[in-house]
Image (cartoon, rainbow, N blue to C red):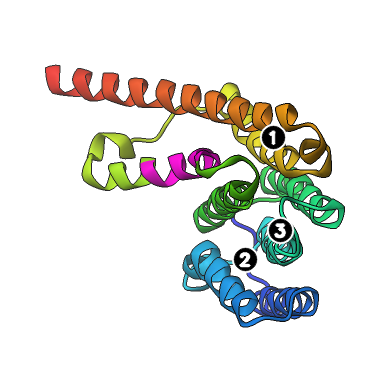
Amino acid sequence: MTPPRSRYWAIYPLVLLWLSVTAALYIRPAASTLIGAVIIIAVASSRSFMRRDPWTLADHITITRLGLIIIFCATALTAPGFNWPATAVGAVALALDGIDGVAARHIGTTAAGAVFDESVDALFILLLGLGLIPLWGLWTILPGGLYYLYRAIALLRPAWRRQLPPSGFRKVVAAAQGILLLSAGSPVAQEYWWFGIGCVGFALAALTLSFGRDVLWLEQKQRQSLSR
């Protein structure tokens, strides 16, 4: 069931994002902070602001996560890796991901809301990987890049646009990505290099396995459709 439209549907997201950008500029007053915040908002939520579906509680939680991600990025840029304040903000953003899932299941969501949530999740994983480059190298963007590579290939190959069946393994892997990558840049990982590299490696291996299973399933379904 689609929840009723709130007459305040556009006020909270805009105010929250404005406050988040203001906080980010306070933490790191630079033109690059503002430009980065605008890019993050555009990539993660541009389609949500243009949608026809009503905003729900789950969407409000997701927009809160997006605001925290902006603050996380500003905090993380003050030093190599993720300091304790950045790690704490990132952890709250990850915790809210689970809460908006509960809200979506019990209160309701929309198709646009599901896309919004997925976009914010994928962008945060990519940003975490980018933040790890100074510590562990360029390969850390691979976990975040796989999602966008998958979507790019799906634009050219219709078989990859098929709806995937529910998968507990896929959900666990997706939830673990943020935790592992945030841990990989934390002060603990900076103290023990093997822990940081291990977290990124485990995240990449699990995500590759998850994507691989899904791609094999999609290709199998495509072959079955053609053979009928």
Say which mark, if any, is on residue 55. Answer: 2
Amino acid type, label 2: Trp
Residues at marks 3 and 2 touching, judged by CB atoms closer than 8 Å: no
Which of 13 and 32 lies nearest the eye of the viewer? 32
Please, what is the three-letter code of the amino acid marked with disc 3? Arg
Q: 16 or 50, which lies in front? A: 16
Q: Residue at x 71, y 58 (%)?
A: 65
**Looking at the rendering, which quadrant does residue 173 occupy?**
top right
Toward the viewer: 194 or 37?
A: 194
Q: Earlier in the sequence, mark 3 or mark 2?
A: 2
User: Which quadrant holds residue 10?
Assistant: bottom right
Q: Amino acid at mark 1?
A: Leu
- Give residue 115's position: percent from left, percent from top: 51, 53
Foreground mark, 3 or 1, reads 1
Residue 228 appears in the rendering: no
Over which residues does the magenta segment extend?
139-149
Question: Per the image, is 145 magenta?
Answer: yes
Residue 170 is situated, as x and y percent measured from the top left of the image, at: 55, 27
- Label located before the other in sequence (3 or 1): 3
- Disc 2, SS: loop
Q: Is residue 44 visible?
A: yes
Which secondary structure class fits the magenta region best?
helix
Q: CA distance from mark 3 to mark 2?
A: 15 Å
Residue sitting at x 55%, y 49% = 126
Residue 180's label in the rendered image is: 1
In x, y percent, where is residue 153?
Answer: 29, 42
Q: CA distance from mark 3 to mark 1?
A: 18 Å
Q: Position of residue 55 (x, y in %)?
A: 62, 66
According to the picture, the residue beneath numbered tag 3 turns out to be: 65
Q: Secondary structure at mark 1?
A: helix
Q: Earlier in the sequence, mark 2 or mark 1?
A: 2
Nearest the viewer among 20 and 116 is 20
